Image (cartoon, helix red, strand yellow):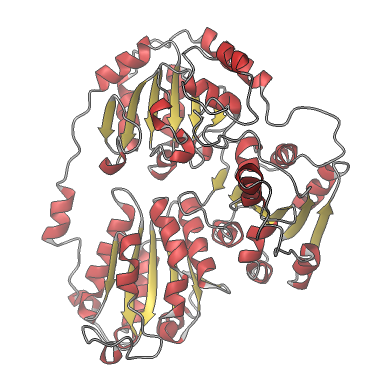
């Protein structure tokens, strides 16, 4: 059979339901191998970056492998941001690039380029993948496909890339004669690897003796498939839980244990609870600066810390912990739950009462009579109109932080975020991939982010996907503008000065979105959101904000996580803290 047909058959057997691509000459064989098939879909987008983000979102929302394809040269290079996003956020995706014929490829010759659009994508992408290989021998295609998919899914998941020259794609092969990776000694060696033993009894003892315990759920909870087991653990122990940005959808927000998001843009009450903890169980979180602040030595300084991660390099990387556990997170929580069968739930009523006091004192959107749109209040309203099972795709910028602070996730909802890469333009193409799971998708973007991949509104319309796009428009690049207000005396270079945003409602209409709406005052916002949600197909809603809209609270440089801007009086902060304040905090 033709090798490109074998590749598509392989993807179908792996359960891949959709391939995302932007066509080019070097992948025409692969595209032709999908023509007319009913067992796999092909979604053609308008930019390779969008294909990569769509594949990432498909993988994250379906639990299956994501696949994106691009042609050689510029097509392959345009995948890079999405590949990096999968690498940093541990998403299993297979990227397939076309390449010039092997007899046109320079290999080790000291030439910049021999064939048209020839680019050594394998060398370029290796730092951002778990496996990258050009397949030069058609007889090795099964081996490379099996190895790539195995590595993408196992251990700490991530992206892989196979570069397929055109003459390899069109080669004739006999599938039953191909050697496989899963039969190799290399595969058997990987299967034999074990993880070090864990002192579960000691961890349970620390947890039982704590007066102010907290669980920090990171993105690894979702990646490992441990959400249900974590919920059982929380019900059994009664421990309160906070999340990182990437862990936001690991716990339903109506759970009595849920305390909100922590970190640089976290809820003030969440940061206060974490700062006052005397025991912290860190599950699948790398404790980056966005969580700890720029003074990691002050992070939960009064707590005994246990960190669990499948990647040994993330353990103790930024914050020194008391117990570092290199373990698969799902297996860790499963074993923990097994050992908790006779566990007596501790009395944490005083601790929860203190946390409730924090929540009442410091809500993100205080109730008041408003004549201007409050972005946090808008997120609360929008979340009320979403239903269980919806997938929410966030872009990067202020819109992301308002949603992270105030959008209340229901049971079964997902929130897809570009975490480590932090790529503007993520949300709309991510919605394309998420929608291929058959669920309704909500896009929350800013006016800057939506313009990065706005061409995918056409893809949305062509496939008539149930995607509702909400754009928080403050007519600037608001997150950096906020930095400029804080650190550059309000010099708005390139965020306001030199930046422009067209009429987004007209633009959406030009792309064929028939259901378009504008919200420019708080009055009627709820009714407009309800109408947009009721539309069966795509809808586009522009929300007009003041240009000077801020994300508050915000952790600034050299401050511990409990000391957020706008700053509390030091005496008030001291009363809220059960441990000593940090010395040397700048005025």
Front in this rendered view, residue 273 or 185:
273
Front in this rendered view, residue 435 or 40:
435
Q: Is residue 100 above or below residue 364?
A: below
- Measured as percent of width and height from the top left, residue 573 is found at 58, 17
Q: Is residue 460 above or below residue 535?
A: below
Front in this rendered view, residue 189 or 71:
71
- Measured as percent of width and height from the top left, residue 24 is found at 48, 83
Answer with left or right where residue 580 lies relative to residue 501. Answer: left
Front in this rendered view, residue 412 or 380:
380
Q: Quadrant of the N terminus?
A: bottom left
Q: Is residue 273 above or below residue 130?
A: above
Q: Is residue 465 visible?
A: no
Residue 305 falls in image quadrant: top left
Answer with left or right where residue 295 lies relative to residue 310. Answer: right
Q: How many marks?
A: 0
Answer with left or right where residue 388 lies relative to residue 63. Answer: right
Q: Quadrant of the C terminus?
A: top right
Residue 7 falls in image quadrant: bottom left
- Measured as percent of width and height from the top left, residue 14 is found at 36, 62
- Measured as percent of width and height from the top left, residue 385 is found at 73, 42
Answer with left or right where residue 500 lies relative to residue 126. Answer: right
Q: Is residue 420 visible?
A: yes
Residue in view at x 82 percent, y 28 percent:
368
Q: Residue furthest left?
A: 185
């Amino acid at each position: 059979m033709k090798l490109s047909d074998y590749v598509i058959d392989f993807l179908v057997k792996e359960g891949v339901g959709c391939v995302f691509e932007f066509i080019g000459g070097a992948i025409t064989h692969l595209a032709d191998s999908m023509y007319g098939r009913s067992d796999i879909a092909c979604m053609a987008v308008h930019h390779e970056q969008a294909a990569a983000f769509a594949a990432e979102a498909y993988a994250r929302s379906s639990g299956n492998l994501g696949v994106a394809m691009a042609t050689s040269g510029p097509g392959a290079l345009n995948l890079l941001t999405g590949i990096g996003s999968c690498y940093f956020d541990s998403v299993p995706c297979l990227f397939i690039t076309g390449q010039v014929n092997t007899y046109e490829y320079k290999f080790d010759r000291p030439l910049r380029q021999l064939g048209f659009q020839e680019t050594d994508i394998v060398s370029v992408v290796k730092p951002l993948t778990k496996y990258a290989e050009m397949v030069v021998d058609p007889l090795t295609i099964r081996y490379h496909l099996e190895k790539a998919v195995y590595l993408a899914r196992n251990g700490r998941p991530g992206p892989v890339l196979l570069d397929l020259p055109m003459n390899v794609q069109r080669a004739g092969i006999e599938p039953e004669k191909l050697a496989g990776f899963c039969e190799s000694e290399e595969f058997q060696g990987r299967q034999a690897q074990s993880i070090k033993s864990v002192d579960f009894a000691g961890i349970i003892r620390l947890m039982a003796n704590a007066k102010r315990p907290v669980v920090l759920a990171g993105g690894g909870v979702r990646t490992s498939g441990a959400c249900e087991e974590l919920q059982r653990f929380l019900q059994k122990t009664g421990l309160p839980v906070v999340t990182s940005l990437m862990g936001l959808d690991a716990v339903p927000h109506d759970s009595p244990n849920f305390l909100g998001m922590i970190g640089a843009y976290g809820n003030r009450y969440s940061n206060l609870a974490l700062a006052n903890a005397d025991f912290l169980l860190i599950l699948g979180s790398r404790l980056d600066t966005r969580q700890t602040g720029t003074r990691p030595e002050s992070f939960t300084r009064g707590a005994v810390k246990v960190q669990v991660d499948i990647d040994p390099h993330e353990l103790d990387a930024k914050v020194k912990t008391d117990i570092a556990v290199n373990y698969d997170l799902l297996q860790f929580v499963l074993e923990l739950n097994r050992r908790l069968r006779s566990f007596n739930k501790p009395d944490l009523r005083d601790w929860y009462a203190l946390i409730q006091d924090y929540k009442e004192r410091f809500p993100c959107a205080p109730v008041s009579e408003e004549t201007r749109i409050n972005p946090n209040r808008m997120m609360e309203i929008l979340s009320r109109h979403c239903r269980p099972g919806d997938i929410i795709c966030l872009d990067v910028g202020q819109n992301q932080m308002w949603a992270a602070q105030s959008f209340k996730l229901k049971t079964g909802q997902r929130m897809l975020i570009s975490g480590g890469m932090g790529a503007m333009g993520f949300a709309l193409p991510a919605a394309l991939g998420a929608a291929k799971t058959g669920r309704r998708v909500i896009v929350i973007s800013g006016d800057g982010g939506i313009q990065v991949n706005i061409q995918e509104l056409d893809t949305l319309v062509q496939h008539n996907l149930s995607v509702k796009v909400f754009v928080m428009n403050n007519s600037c690049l608001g997150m950096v503008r906020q930095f400029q207000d804080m650190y550059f005396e309000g010099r708005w270079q390139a965020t306001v000065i030199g930046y422009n945003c067209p009429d987004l409602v007209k633009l959406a209409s030009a792309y064929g979105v028939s259901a378009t709406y504008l919200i420019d005052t708080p009055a009627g916002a709820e009714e407009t959101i309800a109408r947009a949600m009721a539309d069966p197909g795509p809808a586009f809603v522009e929300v007009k904000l003041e240009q000077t809209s801020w994300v508050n609270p915000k952790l600034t440089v050299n401050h511990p996580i409990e000391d957020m801007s706008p700053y509390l009086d030091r005496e008030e902060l001291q009363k809220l803290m059960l441990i000593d304040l940090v010395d040397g905090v700048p005025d």
